[in-house]
Amino acid sequence: MSPPATRRPLAAVRGVDVPPFYTSRIARRATELRQAGRAVIPMHFGAPTAGTPPGVRAAAARALADDPNSYFESRALIERIGRHYRDSYGLDIDPARIQLTAGASAGLVAAFAALFHPGDRIAVGRPGYPAYRNALRALGRETVEIDLDAASGYRLTVAHLDAVPDPLHGLLVASPANPTGAMLDAATLEALAQRCRERGVRLISDEIYHGISFGERAVSALEVDDDVVVINSFSKLFRMPGWRLGWMVAPATLAPRLSAYVINCFLTPSALAQHAALAAFDDPAELAATVEVYRANRALLLTQLAAAGIDDLVAPDGAFYLYLNVAHLTDDSLAFCERLLEDTGVAAAPGVDFDPVGGHGAIRLSFAVSADEAVRAAVLLREWLERQPGR
Ligand SMILES: Cc1ncc(COP(=O)(O)O)c(C=O)c1O
């Protein structure tokens, strides 16, 4: 049947294009290889391979028996998060300032939408977590990328901020950062917060890797300034990435506005996840033991990769990633990761996800794996890197 004469072709899609996570291609191939019986070491996504802590799974099983089938916002969890700020940072946070979100991802989108106007300029470090840039782009906000380099430990400073011309409306910092693990000390965070105040720039602090550090503990932006928006999540330290649960802390004046955005865009996070997460704080020894595994993995990989000729190795202060310069071996980090996976079963993330400019010669390895996986990966990576032309 021919279409009616009045029917017009659909207009072209009018939304802005955002790039995919190229790491997803590695993830898909890793799954195929695994299904075909190959041993794969998953160092591509930032998903701890130790799995959800047993106490959390047990709490979820109990909650499931009561059918947590409704929209739900756990007051108990919000209060427990408030206690976490008292215990871990000595901070008294009014629970009214805490908003639960479906992972840090939803918190970031809500903050970008609620706090900025289309066309506003928000500064982020490069290399950095790709969704900052891509979500801002999807929302019509402009990302101003600040180049960070290995020589300065990938740390964002006031000098970087001062080099960004006006107008500037937001600054997003992450400490520890993805993909570099770089941390900002209290003095740097305080100086950044102060300059943001002077320039009328809204400061957002992504603290999703707090609790995972290898020297000093990470400082929360809330310790240096009350007028910041903090994003956090159960995905990393608490090993619950698939549960899709996070939180944000906002100044009292902004909390209702952020809550309205969260509810309109995402309703509530998973009720089951909220029940389960109450138990996440109950077993600090389990979490600390996992961080000790990461510490040993980090040391082992740093030694083995240096021996395999990887230069500019920056030892991460926190999080669970190594960001490697492999520019002497490739100018196509995705193809490089594909080859690495096919040859060795080690899945890595291509640097181009984190840095569209300089990341073609870089890869990111997650060491949130077991000690055994790290030992195997270190051997496989070293042998493979030593065989590469250009070495
Ligand atoms: C720096 C950073 N922020 C936010 C996220 C998103 O985390 P979530 O799983 O809580 O949505 C990630 C995930 O890897 C991340 O690395």
Image: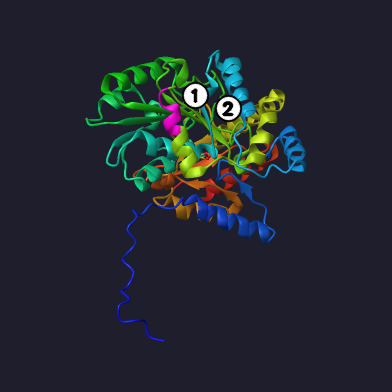
Quote the CA–CA distance across marks 2 and 1: 24 Å
Helix, strand or loop at label 2? It is loop
Figure check: 112 above or below 81: below
Q: Residues within 10 Å of mark 2 (few under 14, many from 20)?
A: many
Q: Residue at x 54, y 26 (%)?
A: 210
Q: Position of residue 316 (x, y in %)?
A: 50, 29
Could you tell me if residue 185 is visible in this image? yes
**Residue at 40% from the left image edge and 20% from the top image edge:** 227
* Rendered position, 212 above or below 106: above
- Secondary element under disc 1, as helix, strand or loop, is helix
Indicate the position of residue 378 as horizontal and vertical percent values: 61, 40
Asked whether 360 or 213 is in front, the reply is 213
Q: Pointer 2: what residue?
A: 212
**Cβ–Cβ below 8 Å for labels 2 and 1?**
no
Query: What secondary structure do most residues of the magenta stretch adopt?
Result: helix
Q: Residue at x 61, y 52 (%)?
A: 345
Q: Is residue 150 above or below residue 223?
A: below
Q: Farthest residue in the top direction?
A: 90
Give the residue at the far left of this rendering: 166
Q: Quadrant of residue 369?
A: top right
Which region is colored magenta?
253-258
Residue 228 appears in which quarter of the rendering?
top left
Q: Which mark is residue 97?
A: 1
- Identify which amino acid the numbered label 2 is placed on: Ile
